[in-house]
Amino acid sequence: MKFFKKLFNSKSENELIREKLLGLSFDDFAVNLANLIDNENYNLVSEVAKELIQENHLTGVLIGKKSWFLHNGYEKLENVWNKLQYGKIDLDKYADEWKINQKRVYLAIMDYANFKEVKENEFTRVKGKLYLNKFLMDIWYRSISKYTETDEIEFQNIIKNSGLDSHDQEVFANFCKNLLSNNSFRYNIGLDGYIRDYDVISSKILDYIPEYFDKGHDLIKFSHLSEKYGVTIEKVDALISSLIDQDLLKDVTLYATDEYLRPRLT
């Protein structure tokens, strides 16, 4: 009888975990809930903690899948998020403050980003520093807006005049290089280190081809123009075909299949 009485009066593991979690008090740093209540089933502890958070019985956020918990986490992460709008954050700084490793700080921020409907590929992470790509993109547009659409802009001037410190300039330079290598992006960087609006490249090619032939060259490859102006061979083909169709590029013979031009013999 005593066995059955004990059996029917016993609490489920979920209920025991729930009671123990509700009995905890928290500081401003992250803790491992499973360790605190001496329960090795961190998946179940996380599940119960999630329910308590949803019921507003626990105030904070879970980090990852190992039952790590940050008290008042939404407030802390919103503060981090606001800082990301205007610059980088140091992941190690928050790792020290929250007493967790850098990886878990990053996981917490990515979970919060997901809540904000911002994807992981919209961040740049370099040497423990985290940037929102939107922040870097804003600097790009602010820098490029100082020039007209027809200007040829030296890449290094964009970086030097970004208003960033040396470390951030390096990050910004790599961000811009990736941006300019995107074939769908409006701007391109040539072999000479100058940035040009795509629409400008057409007129540059129109001027360059006759000059190239005047120097004694008997053909010009699309690959040469592609490297020089930082656009794909397909785009070079399209630009040249358009110039010929508009009767702007004259006295040349197009070998589209072989991807080159020759001066027309007169």
Image: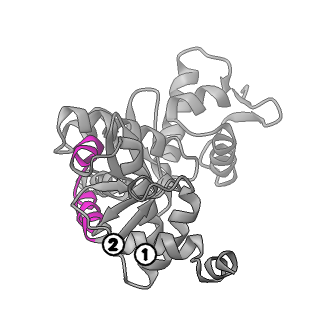
| Residue 94 is inside the magenta segment | yes
Q: Quadrant of the N terminus?
A: bottom right
Tag 1 residue = 19
| Three-letter amino acid code of the residue under disc 2 | Gly
| Place of residue 215 in the rendered image (x, y in percent of width and height, measured from the top left) | 53, 16
Q: Height in image: 45 above or below 189?
A: below
* 11 up-or-down from 41: above or below: below
Quarter the C terminus occupies: top right
Which residue in the structure is indicated by mark 2? 23
Most extreme residue toward the top is: 216
Provide residue 164's location: percent of width, then percent of height: 19, 42
Magenta residues, dominant SS class: helix
Q: Identify the residue shown where x is 45% and y is 62%.
A: 111
When the figure is inspected, residue 44 is found, relative to residue 258, above or below; the finding is below
Q: Is residue 260 above or below residue 49?
A: above
Quarter of the rendering containing residue 58: bottom left
At a point 49% along the width and 37% down the height, the residue shown is 207
Q: Are marks 2 and 1 in contact (CB under 8 Å)?
A: yes
Part of the protein shown in magenta: 75-96
